[in-house]
Image (spheres, helix red, strand yellow):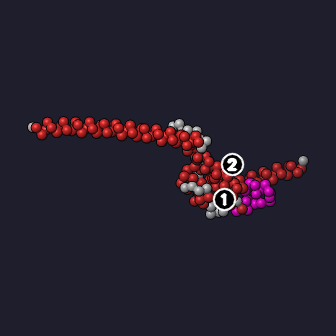
C-alpha cells in the first residue's frame, strides 16, 4: 500500500517539473524567434527591402519571384528564339533560366494559362506572322517549317488556337489588305 501512495506523489512531481520545463522551452523558442525576426528585419531594411510583416507578405514575395521567373522566360524566348529548334523542351528552357523544370512548368501554367507546349507554340505562331509580313509569298507549309513546327497539322491547330482562324485564311486576308493598300 505504501508503494502505491508514494508513486502518485512522485508522478505529480515529475509532471510538474515536465510542465515547467515545457513552458520554459516554449518561452525560449518565442524569444529566439523574436530575436531572429528582429535581425532579419534589420538586414532587410539595410538592404533596402521593407521588413517582413507576416505570412501574407511572404506569399506576395513568392508571387513576385514567380512573376520574375515568368518574365525571364518570356524575355529569353523573345531574345534567343529557342522555339525555332524543333526539339526544344521544357528541360532546355529550365536550364536556360536556371530553374527546376517542374517549378518552371507550374509558373508558365499559372501566368500564361497554357501548358509548356502551348506556350512554345504561341511564340512559334507569332514568329510565323512576322515571317509572313516580311514575305507575303510564303506558303503555309513554309511558314510552319521555318517557325519550328514538326508538322503542318500541328501548325494549323496551334495557329487556329492562337489567332482564331486558319493560317491560309489569315494569309489570304492579309494579302487582300495589302492589295487594297496598293490600289488606293
Give the structural element (helix, strand or loop) at label 1.
helix
Question: Which of the 4 image quadrants contains residue 145?
Answer: bottom right
Q: Is residue 94 above or below residue 16?
A: below
| Residue at the image position 66 percent from the left and 51 percent from the top | 74
Can you see residue 18? yes
Position of residue 181 in the picture relative to residue 102 (left or right):
right
Q: Position of residue 156 (x, y in %)?
A: 68, 56
Looking at the image, the residue that sits furthest to the left is: 1
The N terminus, quarter of image: top left
Q: Position of residue 49 (x, y in %)?
A: 59, 41
| Residue behind mark 2 | 164
Give the structural element (helix, strand or loop) at label 2.
loop
What numbered label is drawn on residue 141? Answer: none
| Residue behind mark 1 | 83
Real-space Cα distance between discs 2 and 1? Answer: 21 Å
Please name the predominant secondary structure of the magenta segment in the image: helix
Please name whichever residue, 55 or 172, is drawn nearer the observer in this view of the structure. 55
Please name whichever residue, 8 or 41, is drawn nearer the observer in this view of the structure. 41
Q: Position of residue 23 (x, y in %)?
A: 34, 36
| Range covered by the magenta-colored residues | 128-145
| Residue at the image position 82 percent from the left and 49 percent from the top | 177
Please name whichever residue, 56 or 25, is drawn nearer the observer in this view of the structure. 25
Amino acid at each position: 500500500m505504501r508503494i502505491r501512495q508514494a508513486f502518485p506523489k512522485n508522478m505529480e512531481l515529475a509532471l510538474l517539473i515536465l510542465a515547467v520545463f515545457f513552458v520554459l522551452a516554449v518561452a525560449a523558442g518565442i524569444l529566439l524567434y523574436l530575436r531572429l525576426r528582429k535581425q532579419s528585419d534589420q538586414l532587410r531594411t539595410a538592404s533596402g527591402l521593407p521588413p517582413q510583416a507576416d505570412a501574407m507578405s511572404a506569399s506576395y514575395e513568392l508571387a513576385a519571384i514567380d512573376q520574375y521567373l515568368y518574365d525571364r522566360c518570356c524575355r529569353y524566348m523573345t531574345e534567343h528564339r529557342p522555339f525555332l529548334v524543333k526539339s526544344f523542351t521544357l528541360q532546355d528552357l529550365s536550364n536556360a533560366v536556371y530553374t527546376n523544370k517542374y517549378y518552371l512548368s507550374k509558373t508558365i501554367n499559372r501566368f500564361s494559362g497554357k501548358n509548356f507546349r502551348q506556350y512554345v507554340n504561341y511564340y512559334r505562331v507569332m514568329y510565323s506572322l512576322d515571317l509572313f509580313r516580311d514575305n507575303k509569298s510564303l506558303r503555309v507549309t513554309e511558314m510552319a517549317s521555318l517557325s519550328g513546327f514538326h508538322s503542318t497539322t500541328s501548325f494549323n491547330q496551334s495557329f487556329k488556337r492562337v489567332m482564331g482562324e486558319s493560317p491560309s485564311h489569315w494569309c489570304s486576308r492579309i494579302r487582300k489588305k495589302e492589295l487594297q493598300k496598293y490600289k488606293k
